[in-house]
Amino acid sequence: MSIAHTTETGWSGGKAAVSALRKVATSFAVILTTLLGLLVITFVVGRMVPADPVIAVIGDQADQATYERVYKQMGLDQPLYVQFATYIGNVAHLDFGQSHVTKNPVASDLARVFPATLELATLATLIGASLGVPLGIISAVRKGTWVDHLARIVGLLGHSTPIFWLGTIVILVFYAKFGLIPGGGRLDVYNEGLVEGPTNSIIVDAILAGEWEVLRDALLHLAAPAIILGYAAMAYLSRMSRSFMLEQLRQEYVLTAKAKGLGQRAIVWRHAFRNIRVQLLTVVALAHCGLLDGTVLIETVFAWPGLGQYLTSALFFADMNAVLGSVLLIGIISIAINLLSDITYRFLDPRTR
Amino acid sequence: MATRSIDALHNWLISEEFTSSRQARFHKAYVLWLNLAGNPLALGGFLVVLSLIVIATFAPLLATHDPILQDLTMALKPPSAINWFGTDEFGRDVYSRLVYGARTTLYISILVTVIVAPIGFVIGATAGYLGGWIDVVLMRITDIFLSFPSLVLALAFSAALGPGIENAVIAIALTVWPPIARLARAETLTFRQADFVVAAELQGAGMARILFRHIVPLCAPSIVIRLTLNMSSVILTAAGLGFLGLGAQPPMPEWGAMAASGRQYLLDAWWLTTVPGLAILVVSLAFNLLGDGLRDIMDPRNA
């Protein structure tokens, strides 16, 4: 189908618009099936659990009549496809069920913990991108020199380090031995609850409220986990931007630019970098996605009250509604980020139109 | 005399005028080895992986203590001549647990590879070979699995299956096969219309025969490279699951779980967390270096 599109030339504007619409429709269909698949996976995982969901609600002391009533109430006597339809309907209404541990609806729990994770992952992505992209470009330009080798080793180390372990060591050295960083959590106790903002991101809320002392404290708490996650992102981004840049530097326009006497700085930043911007945006989005993974472990280490810690403590108490809600949220975010980067790609790169 | 025969062997191996297919096969392996030996980082990675295998195999000989036997009078002792890496909170020797932990790591890596390589290949190659709606459906399923961050997916599955090393292996395998399937599909597509495939089809070869006799040997190098590079993320995910208490169950020694239990005694016993973490780092770095080197050697397109 894509071949047919590229070989037919000389289209009128109307036809181009129709084809653009069709592309959008196709990608929406793709997104919908992916979402459906996601729901199938979480539904199946929920049914695979060896524990009896009814017992989890009523306890093992209840009599047979209560058991059957709750069994019917939970819809477990219905055929599986009806249960699945009910499940989709619930999720569409943002109803992920109730958490056995916090006794709150999972959806409201998620709304409470997610901003903390988003704050951490976003800052980490910014750190990773601002260090990793220049590092990758420099090592592409100076391919084969010591800079390149050093960048490669730094990148490989970032790929190979167990992130939970690095976090533990950082706490041991910088908190326990030198007292340079706070021990964990988002704020010191005496700053807790000073800002109650609209966004639930302490940094944004503190700026909005003008609480500079709280902002400083929040940034201090954020620094260590964000730098560790940022290092992992940097490893990935430097590798990707190196290979993107190398591909550009092989192109003939670079040779032309050299021949007309353009300096290396201008070639790299004004010509080659412009051409890899879109690709870079995509991998930064992917890195942001990947960090949602990393936060699960780092939040446990730094007692960061975010999605990751919520998920792991739910795992610990076999609180399946909370587990599946978190997993579904992370999956939906991944799809959304992929979709967004896909759309920006289409928008910024004229060749894909 | 000895050097002469080694020279003769070298010449026999390096010569490209093969007299038998066996010689050609040895030649290929020998050239691969020479290339590997010429790349110090990849060689280092190879040696570490090799020593992991050796340590895991001969763990009972290399360990100085029983890895499971508890001795509370010896709890939390710092590294010494008797306990090279100290002891843990139950008085177990950390060095011996580390040595036996190599078995767990290797067990997980091998099992995941054995599960994932055939599944990924069959799904990807079938999609690429048959094309049409089968391709669309199979690749859609692959993409759904790819859209989850791998650790989160593994967490969800091991939560459902319950803790334990076998379940951890299944959970990890579920996250590793999609990239393999993608790769196998891409490789199959490039060979789908090749003359030798068409010739085999004309001779009446069925799909299974074409895939396993003709496509597998051509896909194998890139799949091996991918698996080697993936191995580091398999080890890190396994360690992460162990860290969260979902992987290997106590008292089985597993590096991630060892690092996790050491966290409670972090201030008094730094070695408990540091040593197993370093072991994870070294092994996963080694797989990355080896995979990188193999890719440079076997697949120069992506170097």
Image (cartoon, coloured by chain):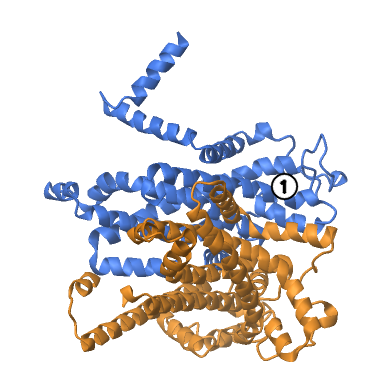
Chain colours: A orange, B blue
Vertical side of B5 occupied by B250: above or below: below
Chain that bears disc 1: B
Residue B233 falls in image quadrant: bottom right
Q: Amino acid at mark 1?
A: Val
The total of numbered circles placed on residues is 1
Q: Percent from the top left, x then y, of residue B57? A: 58, 35
Q: Quadrant of the N terminus of chain B?
A: top left
Residue at image point 65% right, 73% down: A120
Please indicate whether residue B60 sits to the left or right of residue A273 in the image: right
Q: Nearer the viewer, residue A120 or B269?
A: A120
User: Does residue B44 lie above or below B192 as drawn?
Assistant: above
Image side of residue A137 versus residue A31, left or right: right
Answer few, some or many: residues within 10 Å of disc 1's Cα (few below 14, many 20 plus, some between 14 and 19).
Answer: many
Q: Residue A119 versus residue B110: which sits nearer the camera?
A: A119
Residue at 33% x, 76% y is A350
Residue sitting at the far top: B1
Percent from the top left, x then y, of residue A162? 63, 56
- State the residue in front, B13 or A20: A20
Which residue is most to the right? B73
Badge 1 marks a residue whose secondary structure is: helix
Q: Is residue A334 visible?
A: yes
Q: Which residue is mark 1?
A: B275
Question: As drawn, is A106 to the left or to the right of A207?
Answer: left
| Image coordinates for residue A85, horizontal then vertical, percent | 43, 85
Question: Residue A216's image quarter?
Answer: bottom right
